[in-house]
Image (cartoon, rainbow, N blue to C red):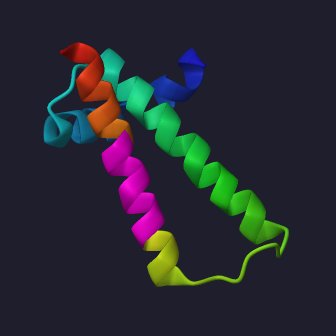
Amino acid sequence: MAVLFFAVSPILSAMQGTAGLGMEQMKKAFFIICMFVHGYASILANNSLKYDEEVIKEHLTRAYRGAILATQDEIK
């Protein structure tokens, strides 16, 4: 897992600045987001879901916001 986070550290740093989280909290949020995106990719790759860019965009935006808010809640 550490190798994954090392490979995406520039992305994590950029996201960390906009989310207002520490690096460890950002890693947690990023992992949640990755699992959600991977699930969508798997469902789409198996043709189990009709591709609808607007719906997927909305869901991924909500997943991102939810992961950030959940991680921020842990800090409080």
Rendered location of residue 28, percent (x, y): 43, 25
Whether residue 5 is visible here, answered yes or no, is yes
Rendered location of residue 56, percent (x, y): 51, 72
- The image shows residue 1, relative to residue 8, as above or below, that is above
Is 3 left, or right, of 44 in this rendering? left
Rendered location of residue 17, percent (x, y): 15, 36
Which residues lie in the magenta part? 58-66
Whether residue 8 is visible here, answered yes or no, is no
Residue at x 73% of width, y 70% of height? 44
What is the quadrant of the N terminus in the image?
top right
Q: How many marks?
A: 0
Asked if residue 74 lies in the magenta stretch, the reply is no
Residue at x 49% of width, y 77% of height? 55
Is 70 left, or right, of 49 in this rendering? left
- The image shows residue 40, relative to residue 20, as above or below, that is below
Is 74 left, or right, of 76 in this rendering? right
Residue at x 85% of width, y 68% of height? 46
Secondary structure mostly seen in magenta is helix
What is the quadrant of the C terminus in the image?
top left
Q: In the figure, residue 8 lies in which quadrant?
A: top left
- The image shows residue 55, relative to residue 67, as above or below, that is below
Nearer-the-camera pick, 57 or 15: 57
Asked if residue 62 lies in the magenta stretch, the reply is yes
- The image shows residue 29, relative to residue 40, as above or below, that is above
Residue at x 48% of width, y 26% of height? 5
